[in-house]
Each structure stands twice: as C-alpha cells, then as structure tokens.
Amino acid sequence: MTTPFSQLARTLLVLTLTPALPAFADTIRGRVVDESGVGIANVNIDAEDMLTGDPVDVINGGTDASGNFDAQLPAGLYRLIFHPPAPPTTTLLAEVLEDVVVVGTINLGTIVLESGVALRGRVLAPGGAPLAGVDLDVIDLLSRERLRLTDDDTGLDGRFLIAVPARRIEVRFDTTPVGTSIAPTLRELVLSADLDMGDVQLEPGFVVTAVVRTTGGSPVPDADIDVEDQATDEKLFTPGDGTDVNGFVDFVVPAGTYDIEFCAKFADRLVPFEIQDRLITGTTNLGIVTLGPGVVLSGNVRSGAGTPIQRVDVNLFVSSTGQRQLTCNDDTDAAGLYRVIVPTGTFDVVWTPPYSEPFRTRVRTAVTVSGDRTLDTVLAACDCAVSAGTGLAGTGGLVPVISASGGYLRIGNPDWTVEVSNARGGATAFVFVAAGRVCPTASVGGTAFPKQLLLHPPLPLVLSGPAGAAGAGSGSVIAELPDDPAIVGLELVAIAVVRDAGVARGYSRTPHLCGTFCD
C-alpha cells in the first residue's frame, strides 16, 4: 500500500509531476476496518506533504457507515493519517501510511486499525487545581514511535481520555501551552487493559538556559539537550530543548539534581558534553557550554548468521579510568549500523542489545581511536526459556501449562514474564523463579522445588476464567530478572503451583520452565 522513496527520489517525483498536474483534485479510495474486519465509520483522514511536512486539505476525508472512503486531494507524495473516533466511541489506534503517491485515482485497499485500550486520568496544577490545555504525547516503547492521538489535550476539568496500545508506553504531559511555571513530566506504563491513572500531580517548573558554542566561539544550532534525574536515573521530558541559530536554549524542569547532556548534530562532528550534579531550585543560567571537535566511530552489529541487529545500545568507557564517555544517538539502525562522535583515546566498547532480541552483550577492551574508525561486531545468541519435564494434573485431568514472554534471559530484563494457562478457572497460582545449575527434566513429587537460589519470593497470580472450570484459568506475572553477573551461565528454573480443589492433593503444578542466563 505504500512505496518507500529516498529524499532525492521524492524530489524528482514531485518535479516530474508538477508541470503536468491537473487543476482538479485526485482521488484516494479504500476501506477502514478493525482487526475483525468490521468497517469503521467516521474515521477522519488527514494528509501531510512528505517534502514540506505541511498539512494538506482532504476533501470528503472521512469514512461512511461501512468504513469506505472516497476522498480528494491534489496529486503529490503524502503521509496519510487515519484517525478513528476517540474514546469512549472506540479504542482503536490511528494508522499512518508513509510515502503514498497520489496521481489520478489510487485504491489503498483495506486499512486495518489496531485495537488499543482506554487511558484516562486528570492533570492537576502544583496547587491541586485541575489544569486545562496540557498536551499529551504517547511513545510506543516497542517501536519508539510517537502515536497520532485524537483529542489529546486536557479539558477544562483537567481530564483526558485517549486510546493507546496494550503494551509498554511512555505518556508525556507537555505543559508548554500553559506556561513555564509548571514542569512537564512523563509516565511509563505497561498496559493490557483499560486504565484510570487517577490524578497526575504536576510540579512547579524552573527555566534553565544555556548557550552552546564551538571551541572557536561559533554558535551550535540544533543541538539537543537531555536531562537525567540523578535520584532515579530517568531521562526527563523537556520539550523545546533544542538550540536556536544563536546556540541558545531554554527548557523547564522541576527542582532536583541533574546530569545535563549537550549533543550537537552528527554532521557538526562535535564531542558531546555533560554537566553533572547540577542542583536546580530556581531559574538557572548554565552559561556557555563549549563543544570540541571529535572523530567518528562507526560500525555494523550482526548476529552469527549475519543478520543486522537493530536498537543495540553502544557505550564507551575510558580504558584507563573506567569513566563513561558520553555518546549521543548511539543505537544501531535497521541495518545494524551505528555511528558516534568521540574524542581520540583508548576505550572499552560495550554493545548491549534490547531485551526483546535473542543476543548477548559484547565487550571489547582497549580499542584505540586516533581518527575516524570502523569497528564491527557480532553478538552471540542468548537463551529463551522452554518447558521441560512433566507437571501434575488438576481439575479435569489437565496439566497446567507454563511459558514465558517479555524477551530473553538477559540479566536485568525488566519485562520477563511467566504465563500460566490450562489451569483451574479462578484459581490462585504461585510462581517460583530460581537460578541453579541443573534444570529438572522429570516431575518431582508434591510441591517440591529443587534447592535453587530463588530470585523472588513466590509470586501470587489470580487466574482468569469461570471459577472451577477445567482448563479455563490463565494469567501472567512479571518476574523481573536481577541485574546480577553472578547468575550468568546458571540455569533458570521456574514453576507455577495452582491451588486446585478439584483434586485430592489440593493443587496442580506446571512442568518446569528452563533456560540459561546470559549477560
């Protein structure tokens, strides 16, 4: 339905088409449905010019009662956004089509909108009064993309109601429209159902200013500033944190102690700079921040099979001191490529894949960088967890099933999740997760669990389904893996014990879930 174009190709396309553009509008047709194939009425269609980013009027830009659309707009290259009705009418998510060439009549076919969940709440000013006009942004942390939202400002009563994906997201509360005396903020959420956040209390804000220059005194425009809270190690949401043509920047933060990073555009080839341990309790001028010249360290990150690995985080540490060398925009792209600006020196380089990818961290020590250098690497495989052995049957003679989601067995994985199914409906289960040296391959009697190192206290889990129904019970619980190098190479062993009044022993049990921890 979409055709990718490079910037050059887009420009050539438009230049080619422009002399022959007809005076009348061209047409896009199609149908918008949900994941069950049901047509969605009143979907609003917006268009943006891919070359300029400007909005373009769409005539008849909406769907009928069956989800069909027949809209008109001038010939060109567009980004099309399909906005479904906002909650409570639907909890469907907007769909974006990139690089859509419109010449004549174009049939876009069927556009499927993803089902989401409803997120509601109320935003309060520092004094506790409802705060209207706060702009909400949502980042899908799986794709790192900003969602297109409908009705995403707080109302006069400070309330909001938006549709978001049922997964890990970041919700940003942008206070720019309401002034500089209230700090913006964000919340990270993991959703599987509708959620009421309740009251989101905002803090007083303080303006921070700086001027960014080169060692030669020239201003550095379009530099990006990131602010990290020392108390939480979390990056703050600071809208408007880019420098202007004079190298000037201002942004708003709440009171706190921060590390503040300054990152120039890659093309400027300037080494990033960090102000550490800066206490902010009022309006603050950071003065002139100077960025010196640097060199390019780049490379390709692949698996043992030669496939590129995306979103690998690249970090450098000075070999002689262990001090972290600040790098900016240092994740690999879809082709597995990374490139960062660094000073010359000798570094230990660490490649850390996302937990959702089946690979281990890689470290290379004492890498000398005396000029532009290419440094490729290959990441070894990391285990997932698989079911092993046999369990104990419960109601209806059914053995509960255990599985895992949320990524691989990398230490520190915050999303690793144990899932239980095929158990007694409405029952309570207890999940045990441990590290040991041997994963049992056969069932053990009773509730015995091998003498391993438990990583958590037993995790309680109330299963879904009609109470007492055989095989109807299911559920999941997050069992964050500790960031402990001591367990690398050990076996993960997990089981779930389910209370079950339908069998004489009073419980059933899953097989074991096994795998090897990696770094």
Image (tube, rainbow, N blue to C red):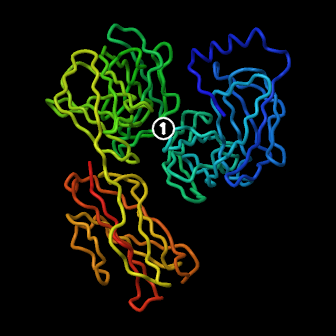
Residue sitting at 58 percent across and 46 percent down?
Answer: 125
Residue sitting at 31 percent across and 39 percent down?
Answer: 304
Tell whether 455 sits left or right of 101: left
Residue placed furthest toward the bottom: 504
Tell whether 272 sits left or right of 400: left
In percent of width and height, residue 45 lies at 75, 36
Residue placed furthest toward the left: 320
In percent of width and height, residue 35 lies at 67, 52
Who is closer to the viewer here, 461 or 500? Answer: 500
Residue 24 vertical placement versus 313 (above, below): above
Dot 1 lies on which element? loop
Who is closer to the viewer here, 476 or 183? Answer: 476
Residue 469 vertical placement versus 247 (above, below): below
Who is closer to the viewer here, 414 or 210? Answer: 414
Residue sitting at 48 percent across and 38 percent down?
Answer: 237
**Image quadrant where residue 276 sits:** top left
In percent of width and height, residue 509 lies at 38, 78
Dot 1 crowding, Cα within 10 Å, few <14, some 14–19, many 20+? many
Residue 450 vertical placement versus 501 (above, below): above
**Where does label 1 land, which residue?**
237
Tell whether 447 sits left or right of 283: left
In percent of width and height, residue 416 lies at 39, 57
Q: How many marks?
A: 1
Quarter the N terminus occupies: top right
Residue type highlighted by circle 1:
Phe
